[in-house]
Image (spheres, rainbow, N blue to C red):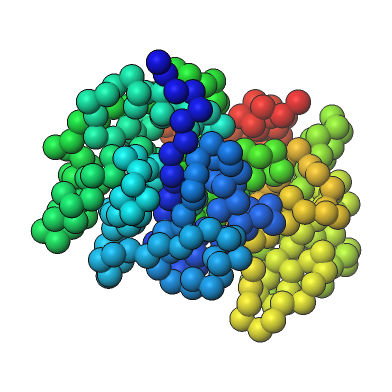
């Protein structure tokens, strides 16, 4: 008979270096003022026991969570397999036949993850591990492992094996396809590897509106287009926030300045950033310019009014969705040919392109396209 109340131990893997997050401890990086680790713990609370944290550095920072901390048994930051080995060894010490492993950077884990993994484990009796699957991908770090695999894994690590798929290729694996169980519009096993991923996570949580950048060379008419779009959107009740980057010191609210024009057009809020300052108004320390993603995150915080869409101007090299403004009189090449993040282009000449193109002067057509693309109502 199926044991619906079966409890297995669980280890949250947080021993990586977080290189793409600037070397920060990913588990402690805040998402809406909560550490990423807290989201994972919330998903499994009451469904697993005991819980341990696989940590290799800054152990004192994690002691406040109150869980046992286990380090990689083989030193050298060998990747997730070393953390999995630590998990298997820990489970063996507890005389547990199975152990669940989860990454620390997956804040959207489905609430039924433990139940469904255990259910398949009990159905497929002759397996070594049970792996989560979604959107056509396998997630071997999100898995139930037989703890007696520890010696085999230790041997593989000592032989130089570093990739999970290589190690598991000789094992009997069962997969839980969560697409067939849940009806998620996004991948619940999405992991956050970069500042842009953190921004996308806030959008999934409904705390940030969609955003795109206006890209173009200086003098191409980005601010003019931005102003007209804001005026158009404001007339039909769509609230626009703007973020503009400046390369120099600036003052706000002087007639004739871009910031003045955008604010008068109806942007609420109007945010502008440069190396020396950003506003709503706050001085930056020297050489402490806020990143694009730090600035966008401000739109999720009080007292900024929640808007329907954010238009970003002046960050043309950042990896965000962009709408290009191109005028050949500038004498510069089109940006979209080298930037896959550009999804459309507006120009004062006819352009043949694989992406949507618009007449720079047809503001209504551009507005309709953006409303449809971002499903703004």
Residue 368, image x, y percentages: 69, 27
Q: Nearer the viewer, residue 95 or 306?
A: 95
Say which residue appears at 77% left-offset and 59% top-offset: 271
Task: Describe residue 122's horizontal placement relative to residue 279 as left or right.
Answer: left
Q: Nearer the viewer, residue 45 or 222?
A: 45
Q: Nearer the viewer, residue 103 or 191?
A: 103
Say which residue appears at 79% left-offset and 66% top-offset: 279
Residue sitting at the far front: 95
In the picture, the quarter occupied by the C terminus is top right
Residue sitting at the far left: 159
Q: Quadrant of residue 206?
A: top right
Residue 170, image x, y percentages: 14, 37
Residue 125, image x, y percentages: 27, 24
Relative to 273, residue 243 above or below: above
Say which residue appears at 64% left-offset and 68% top-offset: 290
Number of dots carrying numbers: 0
Q: Nearer the viewer, residue 16 or 304?
A: 16
Q: Quadrant of residue 83?
A: bottom left
In the picture, the quarter occupied by the N terminus is top left
Task: Describe residue 131's horizontal placement relative to residue 254 as left or right.
Answer: left
Residue 240 can be seen in this image: yes
Residue 326, image x, y percentages: 55, 47
Residue 319 can be seen in this image: no
Relative to 301, residue 168 above or below: above
Residue sitting at the far bottom: 286
């Amino acid at each position: 008979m199926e044991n619906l109340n079966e409890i297995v131990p669980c280890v949250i893997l947080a021993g990586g270096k977080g290189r793409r997050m600037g070397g920060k401890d990913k588990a402690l990086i805040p998402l809406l003022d909560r550490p990423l680790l807290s989201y994972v713990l919330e998903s499994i609370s009451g469904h697993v026991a005991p819980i341990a944290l696989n940590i290799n550095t800054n152990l004192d920072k994690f002691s406040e969570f109150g869980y046992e901390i286990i380090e990689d048994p083989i030193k050298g930051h060998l990747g997730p397999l070393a953390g999995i080995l630590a998990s298997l060894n820990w489970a063996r010490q507890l005389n547990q036949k199975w152990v669940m492993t989860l990454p620390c950077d997956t804040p959207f884990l489905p609430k039924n993850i433990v139940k469904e993994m255990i259910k398949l484990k009990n159905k497929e009796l002759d397996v070594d591990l049970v792996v989560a699957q979604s959107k056509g991908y396998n997630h071997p770090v999100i898995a139930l492992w037989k703890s007696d695999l520890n010696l085999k894994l230790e041997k593989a690590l000592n032989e130089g094996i570093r990739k999970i798929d290589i190690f598991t290729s000789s094992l009997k694996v069962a997969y839980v396809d969560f697409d067939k169980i849940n009806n998620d519009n996004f991948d619940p096993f999405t992991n956050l590897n970069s500042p842009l991923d953190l921004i996308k996570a806030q959008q999934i949580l409904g705390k940030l509106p969609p955003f795109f950048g206006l890209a173009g060379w200086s003098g191409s008419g980005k601010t003019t287009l931005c102003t007209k779009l804001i005026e158009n959107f404001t007339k039909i009740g769509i609230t626009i926030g703007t973020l503009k980057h400046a390369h120099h010191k600036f003052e706000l609210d002087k007639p004739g300045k871009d910031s003045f024009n955008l604010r008068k057009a109806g942007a609420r809020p109007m945010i502008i950033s440069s190396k020396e300052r950003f506003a709503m108004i706050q001085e930056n320390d020297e050489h402490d310019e806020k990143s694009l993603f730090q600035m966008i995150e401000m739109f999720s915080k009080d007292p900024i009014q929640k808007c329907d869409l954010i238009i970003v101007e002046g960050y043309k090299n950042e990896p965000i969705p962009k709408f290009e403004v191109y005028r050949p009189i500038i004498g510069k090449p089109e940006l979209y040919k080298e930037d896959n993040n550009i999804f459309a282009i507006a120009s004062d000449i006819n352009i043949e392109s694989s992406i949507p193109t618009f007449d720079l002067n047809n503001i209504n057509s551009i507005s309709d396209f953006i409303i449809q693309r971002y499903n703004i109502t």
